Image (cartoon, coloured by chain):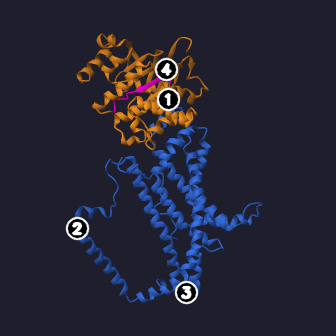
Amino acid sequence: MSADGRALRIEDVHKSFGKLEVLRGIDLSVAEHEVICLIGASGSGKSTMLRCIDLLEPVDAGRIVVHGEDITARGVDVNRIRRRIGIVFQAFNLFPHMTVMRNITLGPTEALRMPKSEAEARATELLERFGLLDKKDDYPDRLSGGQQQRVAIVRALAMQPDIMLLDEVTSALDPELVAEVLNVIRELASGGMTMVIATHEMGFARDIAKRVCFLDAGIILEQGPPEQIFTEPQEDRTRRFLQSIIDAGRM
Amino acid sequence: MAYSRSDAPDSGTIVPGGPVPPGSERRSRLLEPLRQEGAKGVMVAVVSTAVFFGLIGWLVLRSPNWPEVKQLFFNGQEFRDTFPSIAQKFLRNIQYFMIGEVFILAYALFLAVLRSLPGSVFFPLRLLSIMYTDLFRGIPTILVIYLLAFGVPSLDIPGAPTSPTFWAIVGLVLSYSAYVSEVYRAGIESVHPSQIAAARALGLSRWQSLRFVVIPQAVRRVAPPLLNDFVALQKDTALVAFVVVVPEAFKMAQIHQNADFNFTPLLAAALLFLLITVPLTRVVDWMIARERARRQGGGVV
């Protein structure tokens, strides 16, 4: 697709909120069909990094290149870029005043100018694929957290994005609902979707990621295949972070 | 004058209709305690109500001034004679209200959107909107109506309408839009930023996010205060009486009052206003309850 075959390239990205520098020079390159997991403590910059990739936050310095196009350049049509990048949030952020169906077709009909019938046909297909078709006329408040998050994933998928960004999508869920959402993500990964996933589910990260990045204080301190990061981390801080996860019984 | 809106909400108002614990479907706060106490409670309530209002009625009726009050204010004959003509003129009030409300809802939303535009480029527009609301909320509605209805026609602007009724309604629209835009603004600001982020993340433009995601939620949340202003506007259509020769209900009642030296026509006009405003308030309550039930799985979709 792009010259170097990279779906996403992040180069020395910096981002501050007031005096707090949240991202202090992030470099990351993601290949087509690659699944990357971002791990790290709260406040390490995982969410901010994802929000910067979707241009929900402007970067202060550095570049983000998607399929060869510098999306952080001046004068870029942010709406056009965002249509190619799907993001799913920790708190689902479904539109409460719309049915499940309308939540999913809003983007395609309004942003992509797709005819309503086509958008609904595609939404129906996706809902069926993820076992949500019987919920299509319900309002989000009526669904369980797991169902809501699956709808949010479907909503992002309906835009047929090149890349999916998942921001701790299971963190707001009851433990028994986590699996259904993770299974959806597994299916996406096996379908070849390029994904960057911020997660606290270490077992899942180990399982699904081709590469795991450990973020610490706004930089990617260490990255590598999951076997390496989880079994023989090079950095002291990575080791301590993983130890704290094990101590908390979450691995 | 009694035209001020004591219950006019401002931007600081906490709007009802936000999240409610599931299962808390709305019931009448007046009657709910009775339901819990059962038959005995109902009996007690009936008796105490009868005694209470009976006592008040008895006190009023046996007061030495009652015959005079009745003659001047609650005169049955006078009521029968004047009510039909006042009721007929009341259609004008309804007309003013309906026309005014349409423009107020649209214009106020425009003002509210202006004020919520982000970024420094739009600062002048935000400032304009703020100045507008400050100005028109700070001036008595009757004064605005006076100024426009008497002032503008005397300018003799070619092509401009000269009807005082027209300008009186314009005055109502200008004044009420300032209040209503603040209600909208409270609603717009109450929509969580994550909703906007979700909309923008789908590639919707700023305007599309506002139109499809923010405004629909905002309007639902501020429906009760919006309807408060509806009710207030319905009452304030009587202000048109001060500048217009063509009588509406209040003016008509005044004409009867002056002719007959009796205040009953004014109470007849008051009754007409109540006939609209009280049911309107109840309809809003019902709408809110229905919306809530639908969203929270209590009711039938």
Span shown in magenta: A161-172
Image quadrant where one finds the C terminus of chain A:
top left
Q: The residue marked by circle 4 belongs to what chain?
A: A
**Structural distance between the alpha carbons of marks 3 and 1:** 71 Å
Q: Nearer the viewer, mark 4 or mark 2?
A: 2
Q: Earlier in the sequence, mark 4 or mark 1?
A: 4
Q: Dot 1, how many residues are within 10 Å of its Cα: few (below 14), some (14-19), or many (20+)?
A: some
Q: The residue marked by circle 3 belongs to what chain?
A: B
Query: Which residue bears the numbered disc 1?
Result: A57
Query: Which residue bears the numbered disc 3?
Result: B261
**Structural distance between the alpha carbons of marks 3 and 4:** 83 Å
Amino acid type of the residue that numbered disc 2 sits on in the rendered structure: Ala
Query: Which residue bears the numbered disc 4?
Result: A13
Residue B236: x, y in percent? 55, 67
Q: The residue marked by circle 1 belongs to what chain?
A: A
Q: Secondary structure at mark 3?
A: loop
Residue B239: x, y in percent? 58, 69
Amino acid type of the residue that numbered disc 1 sits on in the rendered structure: Glu
Q: Secondary structure at mark 4?
A: strand
Q: Dot 2, how many residues are within 10 Å of its Cα: few (below 14), some (14-19), or many (20+)?
A: few
Chain shown in orange: A
Furthest residue toward left: B40
Residue A12: x, y in percent? 49, 17
